[in-house]
Image (cartoon, helix red, strand yellow):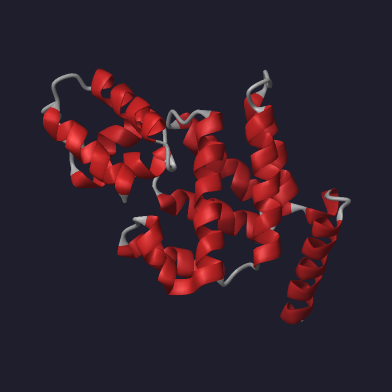
Amino acid sequence: GVIRDQLSMITQSEKIPMEDRALEYLARLGDGSMRDALSLLERCVNFHVGKALTYEMVLEVLGSADTAVYSALFRAAAGGDAAECMRLVSGLIYAGGEVRQINDDFLSYLRNLMLFKAMGGEVRDMLDLGEESVVRLGQDAELTDIQELLRYIRVLSALSDELRFMTRKRTGLELALMRLCLPEMEEDISGMAGRIRKLEGRIAEL
């Protein structure tokens, strides 16, 4: 993408050795903002002064995880497994993840999933993802529909705004994940749709 190409030009001009996979990951985390991508790059460079930046180093500095973790988190939420959601979040935080970044990363995964659901394989050129990640998106897309994805995105987008003012950020994230797992907590029409889907799933298992 454009952000990746601009980052590549900057790292080359500044003589910052960087693994291609790490460069692509930073571009994705920037989410369309060159300023954000540069800020993330600066954090990584300052943490590993004078070293060639690898993908693993970038993950270490930013406290982020690969898409496999967010796929697992989505699958747990879609399956109503609140305990597994809490376990996965606990693991991310224990590994150094910051709550706001975890929420933002999960939102990015859900956004990609929504695009895949809407556009199918045509979306791969827009996402700048590896083949393994695209296959995983396709598998996850079979587990939900656009309406449920929009409900997830609304819940986590609202949390993203609220986290700036929260003192107990982890509790806020855990509560939001509970809302994803338990649509019966929602009183609006999107929650009702989620409850119907859960009932349909139980009936199908009979």
Q: Residue at horizontal 65%, vertical 42%?
A: 156
List x then y, in percent, for residue 102.
Answer: 52, 37
Q: Residue at horizontal 38%, vertical 65%?
A: 124
Seen in the image, is 24 located left or right of residue 157?
left
Q: Is residue 61 visible?
A: no
For the C terminus, give its image quadrant: bottom right
Q: Nearer the viewer, residue 192 or 124?
A: 124
Q: Nearer the viewer, residue 7 or 159?
A: 7
Quadrant in which residue 200 is drawn:
bottom right
Instruction: Establish if 180 lies above or below 44.
Output: below
Q: Residue at horizontal 48%, vertical 37%?
A: 92
Seen in the image, is 88 located left or right of residue 6?
right
Q: Nearer the viewer, residue 16 or 78?
A: 16
Instruction: Establish if 90 lies above or below 153.
Output: above
Q: Residue at horizontal 67%, vertical 22%?
A: 168
Instruction: Establish if 2 lies above or below 90.
Output: below
List x then y, in percent, for residue 47.
Answer: 27, 20
Q: How many marks?
A: 0
Quadrant in which residue 46 is drawn:
top left
List x then y, in percent, for residue 65.
Answer: 41, 42
List x then y, in percent, for residue 186.
Answer: 83, 50
Instruction: Establish if 46 lies above or below 114.
Output: above
Q: Nearer the viewer, residue 36 or 86?
A: 36
Q: Is residue 44 visible?
A: yes
